[in-house]
Image (spheres, grey):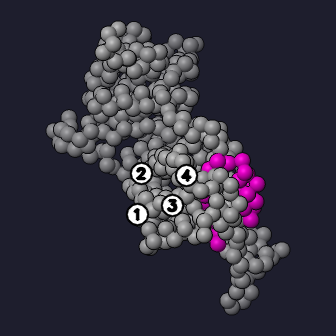
């Protein structure tokens, strides 16, 4: 090979190319050819709707393998299980709005959608659709669901659409899809060797055996951070208050309920960690006394509940740490930068992630979030509204730059 020639990007990669019923299906032919030229072995899986636009024979000739079309063809081979078993990556291009809905909901009625439920490899999706469908609320929600699961969903390009309209819906440029494939096949392992302690969710402070004080935190941001850190090579322990979320794969989970339990769990593991991300929304107060039995409603009079402060976990961790990077969160309703900066300084943090929880589409329980990240040198980084899983990676990017910079964090609280 000539020294000036670039090394093929996908040598040895085993890729499944999913093609769905969009008029942009013809562009998948060029993508297939490019992947093969870059050294990949490609197995094509088509939906029946896709065959209305491009004949399967075209893909068979270019890939050198039969196209999978029917969930029941040669059923003894269990292709929906065997094909993804050996795949390094699945790319669906073009992906229709219908495919996005099926993938987000876990529906499995053809080879392609069924493979998604059995595959353990990365998934890259390149949507294509017409007439403002990309902005439809249902499509937006389905895309957010997939992105929060770690799926790479490319934004479509803007331009003239098949209907003659102009808008966002064109299949992403081939070079952009290839770049996404290459990135997904060579994931960042920049947190390899680090031990990250993440807190998530609310705490519940009991009033009696039935009632408790809590807040609206869903735990989604903390769980997304734990998943992202694990995907980037870190050993992760997640200390979580009560949530309705599934346990992240490959992450050690410690379940707690109260602020006191969370304090003990985090302090016990602080020495083990190299970074602590305090994403939990911990109750500031708890009942001074917990009733041993359910409190009964007595007449129509008012009841007085006496409260006492809970342990300030961030301050406690900051005072005890030796070498750890310490990251806090600030959920605010006003004066975001000022309040977050004050908290950063008062608690001796290296980094603080500030959220305006009144912003539409963000905050507690949402699938999306926006954040302002401030470090102890006063540098401010703004992140717009995005899926929480995407934001988790952005936060980890800032934190990694900080932990990799000599002298960037002190490892101890400063007054």
State which mark lies toward you, 3 or 4. 4
Q: Which mark is residue 376?
A: 3
Residue beneath label 4, please? 407
Which residue sits furthest front? 407
Real-space Cα distance between discs 2 and 3?
A: 25 Å
Where's residue 409, x and y in %?
A: 56, 55
Give whichever of discs 3 and 1 has the lower sequence position: 1
Give whichever of discs 4 and 1 has the lower sequence position: 1
Of 228 and 396, which appears nearest the observer?
Answer: 396
Residue 177 relative to residue 409: left or right: left
Which residue sits furthest right? 292
Real-space Cα distance between discs 3 and 1?
A: 28 Å
**Residue 95 visible to an observer of this rendering:** no
- Judge the density around disc 1: few (<14), some (14-19), many (≥20) Cα neighbours within 10 Å: few
In magenta, the rendered stretch is 260-284
- Judge the density around disc 2: few (<14), some (14-19), many (≥20) Cα neighbours within 10 Å: some
| Quadrant the N terminus occupies | top left
Q: Tell me which residue sits at (79%, 78%) in the image.
A: 289
State which mark lies toward you, 4 or 1. 4
Residue beneath label 2, please? 386
Real-space Cα distance between discs 4 and 2?
A: 31 Å
């Amino acid at each position: 090979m000539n020294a000036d020639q670039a090394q093929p990007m996908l040598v040895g990669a085993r890729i499944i190319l999913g093609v769905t019923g969009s008029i942009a299906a013809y562009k998948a032919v060029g993508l297939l050819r490019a992947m093969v030229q870059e050294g990949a072995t490609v197995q094509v899986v088509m939906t029946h709707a896709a065959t209305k636009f491009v004949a399967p024979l075209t893909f068979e000739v270019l890939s050198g393998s039969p196209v999978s079309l029917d969930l029941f063809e040669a059923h003894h081979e269990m292709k929906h299980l065997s094909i993804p078993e050996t795949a390094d990556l699945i790319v669906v291009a073009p992906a229709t709005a219908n495919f996005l809905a099926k993938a987000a909901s876990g529906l499995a009625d053809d080879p392609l959608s069924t493979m998604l439920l059995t595959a353990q490899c990365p998934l890259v999706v390149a949507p294509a659709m017409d007439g403002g469908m990309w902005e439809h609320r249902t499509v937006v929600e389905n895309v957010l669901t997939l992105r929060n699961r770690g799926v790479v969903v490319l934004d479509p390009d803007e331009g003239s659409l098949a209907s003659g309209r102009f808008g966002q819906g064109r299949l992403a440029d081939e070079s952009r899809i290839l770049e996404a494939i290459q990135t997904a096949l060579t994931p960042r392992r920049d947190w390899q060797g680090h031990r990250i302690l993440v807190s998530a969710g609310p705490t519940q402070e009991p009033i009696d055996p039935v009632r408790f004080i809590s807040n609206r935190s869903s735990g989604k941001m903390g769980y997304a951070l734990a998943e992202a850190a694990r995907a980037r090579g870190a050993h992760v322990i997640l200390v979580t208050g009560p949530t309705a979320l599934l346990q992240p794969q490959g992450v050690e989970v410690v379940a707690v309920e109260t602020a006191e339990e969370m304090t003990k769990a985090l302090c016990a593991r602080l020495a083990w960690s190299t970074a602590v991300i305090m994403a939990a929304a911990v109750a500031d107060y708890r009942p001074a006394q917990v009733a041993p039995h359910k409190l009964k409603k007595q007449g129509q009079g008012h009841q007085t509940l006496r409260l006492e402060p809970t342990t300030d976990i961030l301050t406690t961790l900051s005072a005890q740490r030796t070498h750890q990077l310490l990251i806090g969160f600030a959920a605010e309703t006003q004066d975001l930068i000022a309040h977050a900066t004050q908290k950063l300084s008062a608690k001796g943090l290296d980094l603080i992630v500030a959220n305006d929880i009144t912003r539409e589409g963000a905050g507690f329980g949402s699938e999306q979030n926006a954040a302002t990240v401030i470090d102890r040198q006063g540098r401010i980084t703004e992140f717009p509204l995005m899926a929480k899983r995407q934001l988790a990676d952005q936060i980890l990017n800032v934190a990694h730059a900080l932990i990799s910079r000599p002298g960037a964090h002190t490892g101890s609280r400063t007054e």
